[in-house]
């Protein structure tokens, strides 16, 4: 993996940090993403101290900001000639409703709109690698219903509803993007990492009751590099095996409607070739 470049969002703590550590040890050059430069560089120093390896670079953006995402993407294009794997791992859960500077409900913005934007902006760089993968970290917590008039949860907000909606949207994005890229060198899959002891779990349920970050990170690493997934695309993985997500996520009409509404939110149309 010495020439592979892998971006892991949300890699300054939790399963993202652990996955980055494992990928560094396997020889990939890992782009460590944090909300700011300091967090990214501190994580790099931590991994260097643990491994004595240096195959990492910091990238940073507050994922609730379109401008910061675009600036990070520009920096990546300026420094790298390709991107082999994009792992959209960053995720949040908010007990109380809040909004980003663009006025979006924060959970929806960070967990879904940010990976939608980041992925679309990086597709040309991913296509420059011989065989590339996009991995979206979703969840088994999904919803059976999409209210397109209330995607921002202006009414009826609960942290679980907002989280479930964001992860369901991410899965639907995965399936439609995989279809759009079916004739390319890119595969697109999503996964449930397991119930893992992370800050997100503690914030949502008040205690750590899950498995270790090592267990969760293994699912990310598997999706990123496992040879058996070389030509597998458009799948939802659980315990490293394709399983079925909620029925609504396979509705192609709703997938396309969600894509269009997301483009309207961002203010940009994305044509995939």
Image (cartoon, helix red, strand yellow):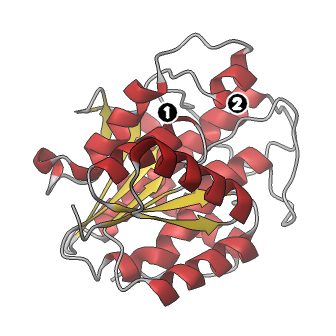
Q: Is residue 252 left or right of residue 116?
A: left
Which residue appears at 82% of the width and 33% of the height? 157
Q: Secondary structure at mark 2?
A: helix
Separation (CA) of disc 1 from disc 2 = 13 Å
Q: Secondary structure at mark 1?
A: loop
- 33 and 245: which is toward the camera: 33
Q: Which mark is residue 94?
A: none
The crowd level at tag 2 (other Cα within 10 Å; few <14, some 14-19, many 20+) is some
- 161 and 10: which is toward the camera: 10
Which residue appears at 79% of the width and 28% of the height? 158
Q: Is residue 215 left or right of residue 42?
A: left
Instruction: Identify the residue at the far left of this view.
Output: 228
Q: Quadrant of the C terminus?
A: bottom left
Residue behind mark 2: 161
Q: Residue 269 in the image: x percent, y percent?
A: 57, 81
Quarter of the rendering containing residue 183: bottom left
Which residue appears at 69% of the width and 66% of the height? 61
Total marks placed: 2
> Would you place residue 147 above or below residue 186 in this image?
above
């Amino acid at each position: 993996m010495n020439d592979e470049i892998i971006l892991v969002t949300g890699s300054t703590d939790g399963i993202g940090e652990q996955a980055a550590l494992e990928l560094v040890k396997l020889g990939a050059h890992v782009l460590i993403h944090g909300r700011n430069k300091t967090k990214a560089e501190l994580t790099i120093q931590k991994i260097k101290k643990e491994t004595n390896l240096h195959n990492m670079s910091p990238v940073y953006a507050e994922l609730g900001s379109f401008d910061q995402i675009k600036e990070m993407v520009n920096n990546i294009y300026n420094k790298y000639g390709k991107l082999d794997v994009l792992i959209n791992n960053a995720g949040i859960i908010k007990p109380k409703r809040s909004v980003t500077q663009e006025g979006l409900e924060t959970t929806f913005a960070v967990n879904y709109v940010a990976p939608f934007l980041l992925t679309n902006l990086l597709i040309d760089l991913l296509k420059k690698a011989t065989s590339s993968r996009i991995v979206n970290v979703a969840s088994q917590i999904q919803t059976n219903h999409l209210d397109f008039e209330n995607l921002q949860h202006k009414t009826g907000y609960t942290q679980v509803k907002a989280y479930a909606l964001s992860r369901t949207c991410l899965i639907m994005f995965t399936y439609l993007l995989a279809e759009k890229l079916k004739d390319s060198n890119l595969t697109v899959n999503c996964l449930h990492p397991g119930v893992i002891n992370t800050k997100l779990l503690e914030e949502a349920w008040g205690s750590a009751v899950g498995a270790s970050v090592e267990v969760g990170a293994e699912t990310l690493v598997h999706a990123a590099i496992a040879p058996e997934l070389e030509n597998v695309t458009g799948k939802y993985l659980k315990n490293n095996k394709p399983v079925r997500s909620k029925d609504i996520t396979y509705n192609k009409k709703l997938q396309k409607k969600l894509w269009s509404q997301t483009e309207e939110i961002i203010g940009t149309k994305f044509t995939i070739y």
